[in-house]
Amino acid sequence: MIAVLAYVPIVLSLLLLCAHFFRSGDMLLLAVVALLIPALAIRKPWLARTVQIGLVFGVFEWLRTGVILATERVHAGVPYQRMLWILGAVAALTMISAVLFQTRTLGKIYGLRHSHRSGENTS
């Protein structure tokens, strides 16, 4: 059950990126991100890292979009703070989604090796 719950923010983050790219008319990036969702079913380490990298790029896309929209709104003299809070929250969700691949649960599912944690036996 915990593993299923770990996928909720990941899939939600990918769907939000799909909606963003659809709205901006970037069908190539929409297709790439959309393909990452069913790819989650493939239990390979390289695929988990691919999705993770895609999510990190998504964080930068949300931040970039926030800067662009805030700049446009400032020049137009309209409020921009709420929009920045929303995009910041979406960027944070997307980053959390990327970090979830570092958890033990998804690490086991995808066969990811994690660095040594203090207190664990190395022998």
Image (cartoon, rainbow, N blue to C red):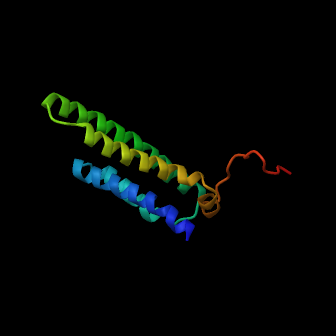
In-front residue for pair 55/8:
8
Numbered circles on residues, count: 0
Q: Visible in this render: residue 12?
A: yes
Task: Say left or right for 6 vs 91.
Answer: right
Q: Residue at x 23, y 47 (%)?
A: 24
Choose top left, top right, bottom left or bottom right for residue 2: bottom right
Identify the residue at image location x=26%, y=42%.
83
Residue at image coords 49%, 46%: 53
Q: Would residue 40 be seen by someone viewing this image from the given angle?
A: no
Determine the residue located farthest toward the top in the rendered image: 75
Image coordinates for residue 25, horizontal then vertical, percent = 22, 49
Image coords of residue 56 (percent x, y): 46, 44
Task: Report which quarter residue 69 is drawn in.
Answer: top left
What is the x, y in percent for residue 63? Answer: 35, 38
Does residue 46 appear left or right of residue 57 in this picture? right
- Quadrant of the image occupied by residue 67: top left
Q: Position of residue 11 (x, y in %)?
A: 42, 60
For residue 47, above or below residue 72: below
Reply above or below: 61 against 31.
Answer: above
**Along the horizontal axis of the image, is 66 left or right of 74?**
right
| Horizontal arrangement in the rendering, residue 22 relative to residue 90 (left or right) | left
Quadrant in the picture for the N terminus = bottom right
* Above or below, 17 relative to 39: above
At x 82%, y 51%, the residue is 121
Seen as rendered, the residue at the extreme bottom is 1
Furthest residue in direction right, as rendered: 123
